[in-house]
Image: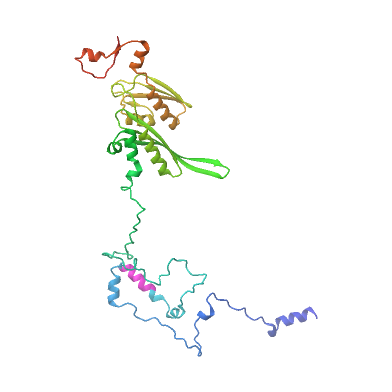
Amino acid sequence: MSAARSLRRLLSKAAQLTPARQFHSTPLAALPRNGPGNGKKVAVRPETRYTAEHLEQLEHYYTPSQLESILAGEAVVDPKDFARRQPRNGHDPYKLNYLSDLSKLDPILDFPKGEFKPAMGHPQQPLPKIEDPDLKFEEEDVQGLYRGEDLSRITGFSQAQLKKFTVRKMVFHRVVNQTRMGKIQRFYALHIAGNGNGLLGIGEGKSAEPGDAGQIATYMALRNLEPIPRYEGRTIYGNVKVKIGAVELELRTAPPGYGIRASEPIFEMCRCLGIQDLSAKITRSRNRMNVIKAALEGLRNQRLPDTIARGRGLKLADVRKVYYNGSNLGGPSSYL
């Protein structure tokens, strides 16, 4: 067989290729059949879909422009498309994965209780109220948040007094511990608390949730309240030098009207404590956590006049109390 003969056979009409079969995504049974043997009745869309009464009701939910767009969109739909409408089968892979196919009326969402006022735009219906005895609002959970009974028993203050104390969030960050099982994430919080009249406390909290860490830090700060001595109720007794970690801190006394000249953590501590005149100098590291701990340690380690007098074996007397008609102003003292 020669090559010319094969070419002639390909070009002949008898060897013309048949057209490929046309594939369609719609099942064959769903396509309409208009042949004489088809006994199915084709659905035809009615010409008038909405009456005047229906249009008047729709005007309460949609603006005139929205209603006009809806009617124009429905008018474009071909009546032949109504013949292809069939419900989706349960095993249809293209069925929408909705919780409800909207084929049944919901007794709560479709029939809401109470007065319903239609608004412009899409209709809105009130959602059902969830009644769960385990859920508590913020007002109902105040007792568990502050643990007022425990703090009242430990500190001796009433719950009303504890709520009036000043609490400040000073440090809050996320910490990660690398283990063989992976990274374990936790949150760290450091709060300070005070009454503004000589009481100050700091508290640390750690938890897997940020809110729990803050609550634990607040609880520990109120629990660790301790009295701090103040000279004339406004400053400290002399200069104090403290070193914690890499933080070197020096607290200096100040005359009346000097103000608080220190960094932000020490400034907030003085406000909670009630100190009005103070200056501070920080050298080397300025880590907020260590600065707060160093400042509290310095306030604890003040050299009081009574301690110095006992160490020298002298008697301490208040000069103002002796020379100003017995009035105790809490001023400077001298050794006699």
Residue 254, percent from left and from top: 33, 21
Residue furthest to the left in view is 325
Horizontal placement of 34 versus 240: left or right? right
Above or below, comparing residue 247 to residue 165 in the picture: above
Residue 178, percent from left and from top: 55, 41
Instruction: Depth check: give the residue in front, 49 or 230.
Output: 230
Please tell me which residue is depicted at 31% across the width and 35% down the height of the picture: 165
- The region drawn magenta spans 64-73
Please tell me which residue is depicted at 60% across the width and 79% down the height of the picture: 21
Residue furthest to the right in view is 1
Residue 32, percent from left and from top: 49, 82
| Quadrant (top left/top right/bottom left/bottom right) for the N terminus | bottom right
Above or below, comparing residue 204 to residue 181 in the picture: above
Majority secondary structure of the magenta segment?
Answer: helix
Q: Quadrant of residue 153?
A: top left
Q: How is the image coloured?
A: rainbow
Residue furthest to the bottom in view is 36
Please tell me which residue is depicted at 30% across the width and 71% down the height of the picture: 58
Residue 22, percent from left and from top: 58, 78
Residue 71 is inside the magenta segment: yes
